[in-house]
Amino acid sequence: MEPYFDRFEYLMGTSGTAGNVKGVKTPGGNPFEDPRFARIPDPGRRRNRMARRCSAMPRPSWVTTPYTQPSCNLSEPYKNPECGFQMGYLHVLWVL
């Protein structure tokens, strides 16, 4: 299934941080993610003020570090590699 998810992420221009690329943990990504073959195409979106404040709060030792979930909301302009369609900021083309 992973190759199909990877293709979809590159078609849609998913933004975020992959937590585990080829067995190497990535800071800022989901620490519980299964290994994937490639990174997510767009960089992650900026955290808002509340997310920054919550991530700076002290946590018990059993709580993991917070991470930003990948999203199809673009963080920067993205060019689709298959059809060359330029997608703008926060614009998503749904291809079914």
Image (cartoon, grey):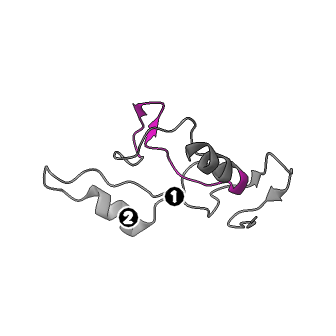
- State the image coordinates of residue 80 (x, y, percent, origin top left): 78, 51
Q: Is residue 87 left or right of residue 49?
A: right
**Residue ID for mark 2:** 51
Chief secondary structure of the magenta span? loop
Tell me the quarter of the picture where residue 76 sits.
bottom right
Residue kind at label 1, given as amino acid type: Arg
Q: Residue at x 43, y 43 (%)?
A: 19
Question: x, y (%) of residue 56?
Answer: 28, 56
Whether residue 79 sits left or right of residue 70 in the image: it is right
Give the residues drawn in magenta, as a range. Answer: 11-28
Question: Looking at numbered disc 2 in the image, what kind of residue is underneath it?
Answer: Ala
Mark 1 Cα-neighbour bin, 10 Å: few <14, some 14–19, many ≥20: few
What residue do we see at 65% from left, 60% from top?
A: 74
Residue at point 38% right, 54% down? 67
Q: Which residue is mark 1?
A: 46
The residue nearer to you, when weighing 96 against 55, is: 96
Kindly indicate the quadrant of the structure image that contains residue 68.
Answer: bottom left
Q: Is residue 12 shown in magenta? A: yes
Q: CA distance from mark 2 to mark 1?
A: 10 Å
Residue 22 location (% of width, % of height): 48, 30
Marks 2 and 1: CB-CB under 8 Å? no
Which residue is most to the right?
A: 84
Q: Which mark is residue 32?
A: none
Residue 30 in view: yes
Residue furthest out toward the front: 1
Q: Secondary structure at mark 1?
A: loop
